[in-house]
Image (spheres, rainbow, N blue to C red):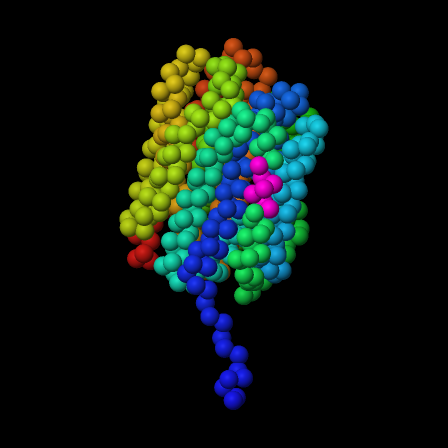
Amino acid sequence: MLTKSLAAPPSPPSPRKRWTVLAVCALSMFLVGVDTTIVNVGLPEIGRGLDVGTRGLAWVVDAYTVVMASLLVVSGALADRLGRRRVFRCGLIVFGLASLACALAPSVGALVAARAVQGIGASMLSPVALAIVVNAMPDPRERARAIGVWASVFGLSMAAGPVTGGALIAAFGWRSVFWINVPVVVAALVLVAVFVPESRGERTRRLDLPGQVLLTVLLCLFVGVLIEGPHLGWTSTAALVGYVGTAAAAAGFVLVERRREEPLTELGLFRRAPFVTAVLGATAVFVALNATLLLNTLYLHHVRGWTALETGAVTLPMALGATLCAPWSGALVGRFGPRRPLILAGGFITTGGLCLVNLDRDTSVSSILLAFLLIGTGFGFANAPLTNTAVSGLPPSRAGVAGAITSTARQVGAAVGIAVAGGLVAGVGHADLAAATRPGWLLVSGCGLFLFLAARTADSRPARSR
């Protein structure tokens, strides 16, 4: 009788339920990734509809990425403390309501504000969903497979954004790229309620509010100077104030983080050369990807006179390369270590950028398609080895922080890529736009070359032998 009265230990979730949890979380990850790039192809239509130039359009993209980048780490800490499913559902609701506000925005100011709120919601989805997946997969081998699927979905979402956006804009106008989020969010909320269990961190981290505020100020000032610099003048009083503010925020952030017992960012990780180059490599990859998407959109629309659908369709080779090579890259990391896929990524991105350094209005479509295939292939090869390099050799407690910093670096790279590319073509007439993009393609190639440095500092041993 006594034995029967004792509560049985909870049985682990079935394989079907575990992979259902992965599918639900991957859906949210796809939503976040797509929204990072889907707007790029609609920028000319947004500019025409809201009567705004390139500088304002850069803020439409970067308001989302900067806010998300600055809040990724603290959102993960809140989820460990308050419950991952709870924070995840809150993020979906915020993201969905902000998408509605974007779709209804009457002005560019309202759109930028709504995009910033979207970034708050997105910051609650990406790291929290991955933590849910890891918690649902107790077997290390199964967890590795799940993370491989996760990486593939992430790469696909970033590359598929322009294609999806082009089709939606052609059929329904630019506001449809935000309307489409609403039914996806509703479906995700239902699936989370049914299939995703609640979980919390075994040891919750204290919230580092001073560090969080300083990080947000630092990123906003840094990206703001890049966007507004060409308009204000790089030596103007406003720009100089921006430089001083950025430096002060950076110094304050380092000072605060060094004195905190549980800092937002572990500065000690930056003493490891492989970690530093992995973080910078992740930034470089996303600078290259987002600069490519913005320059491609503006060139094809303004110089070649292509529609949003045609512009989005040109990025299909990029999506194909990223989708096919992301899982292949993970397999190479497991078998040979991160160096080989990083060298491949650097070679493909560098070559893709060089294909377009002489871009003009008569450049053949086949050359453009080849360049996008090469850049997408490099993007697909890059993510797995960079993440592996960032977290290799670290205990699980520090690996999570390292992964969060790498995710933040990716979003910072996205914001910088948009800001720099937008600055290159701001105020340039349609007749001169092709020539104005050429430094941008050199930047893309330079980002690819940096991956060779990341490969040199990466561990050459196979991941499974460590």
Q: Is residue 413 left or right of residue 117?
A: left
Q: Magenta stretch: residue 184 in it?
A: yes
Residue 340 visible in the picture: yes
Residues rendered magenta in the picture: 180-186
282 and 242: which one is in front? 282
Residue 101: x, y in percent? Answer: 68, 36
Residue 315: x, y in percent? Answer: 43, 28
361 and 262: which one is in front? 361
Residue 455: x, y in percent? Answer: 35, 42
Magenta region, mostly helix, strand or loop?
Answer: helix
| The C terminus, quarter of image | bottom left
Above or below, comparing residue 369 to residue 86 in the picture: above
Q: Is residue 188 left or right of residue 371?
A: right
Residue 331: x, y in percent? Answer: 32, 48
Most extreme residue toward the bottom is 1
Most extreme residue toward the top is 431
Q: In percent of the image, x 59 and y 22: which residue is there? A: 45
Above or below, comparing residue 179 to residue 424 in the picture: below
Q: Is residue 435 left or right of residue 262?
A: left
| Quarter occupied by residue 107 | top right
Q: In percent of the image, x 62 and y 43: which residue is there? A: 95
Q: Magenta stretch: residue 219 in it?
A: no
| Quarter occupied by residue 85 | bottom right
258 and 311: which one is in front? 311
